[in-house]
Image (spheres, rainbow, N blue to C red):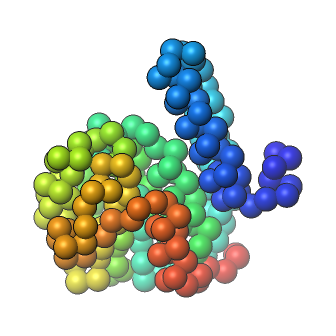
Amino acid sequence: DSLLRKNTFQDVFLNTFIPFLEYVGVLWQSNAFSPSHEHFISNLVRQKILFNIELESAKVFTPNVLFVPFLPLNEIHELGMLFVHYKILQLGYESLYLGQSVPINDLKLFPNRKESIIYVSSFTVAPTAEKALGYINELKKTADLKKHDQMWFSGNRVKHLTQENLPKSCYVFDSFRDLFSQIENMGKVATNS
């Protein structure tokens, strides 16, 4: 809490929580920490993200874009995607967070919509780098993207993909910071209610 008195939540998350979680991951991989230690710390960070999401939920959102953050099937590393959900809300856009390990067929949720949808996902563990492009193609087909819809991806498993490899309306970001910049470039549109 003392960090938040001097910094934005984004600064605390990106410059304190993420490096600390990476350090905890190294300790866990070297057997200096047990999985329960890592889970305990991750859940503390998760609580902070959820608290800040709740604070942003009071905004009035732009009606023409809906973001749908989700994690693919067998992907459970959700802290980054929860933060993406927070950032989308903070920037004034509506966000429907579907959670972790979402089956592809669950993206058929929006057949009769009027607004554009931007699906956002991160591949940290699943699918593998070798299967990422095939998975993205299947996602696009299943979601039945309309003219202005897009799919945005980040994570270690998609860093090798280039825009030339990707289907139309699909984009890969090298980092969450790059993804946030893209959202910010769309313009801040919310007002407080």
Q: Quadrant of residue 48?
A: top right
In terms of depth relative to the viewer, which is nearer, 84 or 146? Answer: 84
In terms of depth relative to the viewer, which is nearer, 109 or 164? Answer: 164
Residue 59 drawn above or below residue 22: below
Q: Quadrant of residue 66?
A: bottom left
User: In the rendered picture of this protein, how many numbered marks are placed on residues?
Assistant: 0
Horizontal and vertical percent for residue 134?
Answer: 13, 54
The reply to whether residue 54 is visible in this rendering is no
The reply to whether residue 181 is visible in this rendering is yes
Would you say 142 lies left or right of 18 here?
A: left
Would you say 154 lies left or right of 180 here?
A: left
Residue 140 drawn above or below residue 155: below
In terms of depth relative to the viewer, which is nearer, 109 or 41? Answer: 41
Horizontal and vertical percent for residue 53?
Answer: 62, 55
Residue sitting at 62 percent across and 53 percent down? 14
Residue sitting at 32 percent across and 56 percent down? 159
Horizontal and vertical percent for residue 107?
Answer: 25, 57
Residue sitting at 23 percent across and 42 percent down? 128
Q: Quadrant of the N terminus?
A: top right
Residue sitting at 65 percent across and 63 percent down? 56
Q: Quadrant of the C terminus?
A: bottom right
Residue 134 drawn above or below residue 43: below
Horizontal and vertical percent for residue 70?
Answer: 37, 53
